[in-house]
Image (cartoon, rainbow, N blue to C red):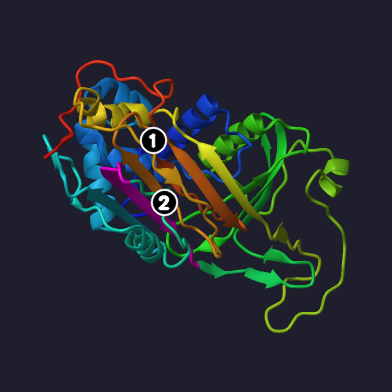
C-alpha cells in the first residue's frame, strides 16, 4: 500500500513484520490476518517500551520513528484509509505512568460494540473482547482500507466472480516458478495485488513469491500483459491459472484493434472466518510487559482474561486490533473477509496462565487500584 502518508520505510516495516509473524507462528495458510492492524497497535505504544533495540528489530522502526509515523497516520489519513485508536481505563484504576494514548473511562460492552461499529463503518458489529469485572485497561486500534477503483472492475453474476479488465495483469517468473498477478487500477496510490501460484507450492513459498512481485513492482520492473520471456509456448497457452485462446467479440464504443491481446482476470467470490491466538506474536509481550509489569507486584491486581467474542462481518476491509491488559497478556484474532480485502480484529486479552507470558526485567510503571 502506497499513500502520501505511508512512506517506503513504513510499508517495508509492516511487510517485514508480517513475514516475521508468519515465520514465528506458522500462519502462512491461516487465512486473513491483518499484520498491519497489529503493527499499528504495537507501534502506537512504542514509548512504553524498555527494550528499544529489540523493538526496532521486531517492528522495523525505532521507538521515535514508530511514534511519529503512527501520529502522522492518525492526524493526516489517506482518503482510502481510516485508522483509529481507543484506550479505556477502569474507573477505580490509576496509572503510575503515562501512556502515549488518550485514556477514557472504561465504558459498557454496548458502548465498545458501538465504537467498533462506528470506527469500521458498520463492518464490525461487535467489539471482539468480552469485558470482565476484573478488566482494568483496554487498548484497541481499527484500520479500514477502502480502495477506489478507477475502472475495469465489475461483478459477473453469471459465475459469481469479480472481473478485472484493466490495471496490471501479467504472468511473472519467480523463484517458485511463474505466478499470475493482477492489480486493479486506482487513482489514489493504493495497490491491491492478487498473486496465485501453482497448487503444489507450499504456502510459505507463495509468500516469498509475493515479496518478489512487490519488490519488482516497486522497482518498475513488471510489464503489463506479458509472460516471462523464457516461458515455453505450450505453457503460455495454458498454465496452472491462465489460458490463452482466440475468440471473436462484439464491442460497443471503444474497441481494441483487430488481432490485439485482451487480458481479463476473474477472482472468485470468497469469505473466510478464522480465529488466531496471537499471544506469542513478536512484539506483543515486548509492548505489553512494561504496561502490566507492576501488576505482578501489586497484590490487589487480579489476573483476568477478557474473553474474545465471535465476530461476523458483512462487507470488507476492517482491520481492528484490540489489546486488553490487567495481567499476563493473551492475544486472539478473529477475521472475516470477502474478495481481495481483509477483515481482521485482533485481541490481546489478559490471562492468568503464567505459561503464556512471563515478566522479565524492570517494567514501565502502569497502574494500581486507587
Residue in the image at 27% along x and 42% along y: 44
Disc 1, SS: helix
Q: Residue placed at 35% from the left, 27% from the top?
A: 285
Vertical placement of 40 versus 279: above or below?
Answer: below
Residue lying farthest bottom?
252
Q: Does the magenta stretch include residue 232?
A: no
Q: In which quarter of the image is the C terminus?
A: top left
Q: Quadrant of residue 331?
A: top left
Above or below residue 356? Residue 263 is below
Which of the two residues, 51 or 171, is positioned nearer the viewer here? 51
Tag 2 residue: 320
Q: Do the residues labelled 1 and 2 touch (CB within 8 Å)?
A: no
Please report the residue visible at 39 percent of the width from the left and 35 percent of the height from the top.
Answer: 13
Q: Nearer the viewer, residue 159 or 335?
A: 335
Does the stretch in magenta take in 145? Answer: yes
Q: Which mark is residue 40?
A: none
In the rendered image, the vertical position of residue 274 relative to residue 122, given as above or below:
above
Q: Mark 1 points at which residue?
A: 13
Q: Residues within 10 Å of mark 1 (few under 14, many from 20)?
A: many
Residue 308, horizontal then vertical, whole percent: 46, 46
Q: What is the CA distance from the residue labelled 1 to the residue labelled 2?
A: 19 Å
Q: Quadrant of residue 302?
A: top left
| Mark 2, other Cα within 10 Å: few <14 / some 14–19 / many ≥20 | many
The range drawn in magenta is 133-148
Foreground of the two, 60 or 177: 60
Residue 58 placement: quadrant = top left
Q: Position of residue 356 (x, y in %)?
A: 43, 24
**Can the viewer see residue 134?**
yes
Q: Is mark 2 on a helix, strand or loop?
A: loop
Amino acid at each position: 500500500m502506497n499513500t502520501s502518508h505511508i512512506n517506503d520505510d513504513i510499508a517495508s516495516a509492516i511487510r517485514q513484520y508480517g513475514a516475521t509473524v508468519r515465520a514465528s507462528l506458522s500462519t502462512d495458510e491461516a487465512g486473513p490476518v491483518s499484520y498491519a492492524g497489529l503493527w499499528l497497535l504495537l507501534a502506537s505504544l512504542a514509548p512504553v517500551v524498555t527494550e528499544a533495540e529489540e523493538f526496532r528489530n521486531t517492528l522495523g522502526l525505532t521507538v521515535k520513528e514508530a511514534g511519529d509515523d503512527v501520529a502522522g497516520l492518525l492526524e493526516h489519513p489517506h482518503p482510502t484509509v481510516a485508522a483509529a485508536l481507543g484506550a479505556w481505563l477502569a474507573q477505580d484504576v490509576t496509572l503510575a505512568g503515562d501512556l502515549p494514548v488518550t485514556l477514557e473511562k472504561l465504558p459498557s460492552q454496548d458502548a465498545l460494540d458501538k465504537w467498533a461499529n462506528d470506527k469500521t463503518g458498520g463492518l464490525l458489529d461487535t467489539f471482539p473482547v468480552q469485558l470482565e469485572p476484573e478488566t482494568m485497561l483496554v487498548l484497541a486500534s481499527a484500520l479500514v482500507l477502502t480502495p477506489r477503483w478507477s475502472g475495469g472492475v465489475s461483478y459477473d453474476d453469471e459465475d459469481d466472480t469479480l472481473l478485472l479488465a484493466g490495471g496490471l495483469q501479467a504472468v511473472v517468473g519467480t523463484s517458485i516458478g511463474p505466478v499470475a498477478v493482477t492489480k486493479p487500477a486506482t487513482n489514489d496510490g493504493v495497490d491491491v495485488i492478487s498473486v496465485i501460484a501453482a497448487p503444489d507450492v507450499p504456502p510459505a513459498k507463495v509468500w516469498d513469491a509475493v515479496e518478489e512481485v512487490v519488490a519488482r513492482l516497486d522497482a518498475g520492473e513488471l510489464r503489463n500483459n506479458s509472460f516471462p520471456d523464457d516461458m515455453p509456448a505450450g505453457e503460455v497457452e495454458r498454465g496452472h491459472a491462465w489460458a490463452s485462446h482466440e475468440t471473436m467479440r462484439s464491442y460497443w464504443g471503444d474497441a481494441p484493434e483487430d488481432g490485439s491481446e485482451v487480458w481479463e482476470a476473474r477472482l472468485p467470490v470468497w469469505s473466510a472466518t478464522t480465529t488466531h491466538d496471537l499471544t506469542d506474536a513478536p512484539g506483543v509481550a515486548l509492548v505489553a510487559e512494561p504496561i502490566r509489569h507492576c501488576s505482578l507486584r501489586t497484590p490487589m491486581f487480579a489476573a483476568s482474561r477478557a474473553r474474545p467474542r465471535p465476530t461476523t462481518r458483512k462487507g470488507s476491509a476492517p482491520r481492528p486490533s484490540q489489546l486488553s491488559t490487567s495481567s499476563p497478556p493473551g492475544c486472539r484474532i478473529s477475521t472475516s473477509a470477502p474478495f481481495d480485502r481483509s477483515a481482521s480484529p485482533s485481541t490481546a486479552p489478559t490471562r492468568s496462565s503464567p505459561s503464556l507470558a512471563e515478566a522479565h526485567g524492570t517494567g514501565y510503571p502502569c497502574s494500581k487500584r486507587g
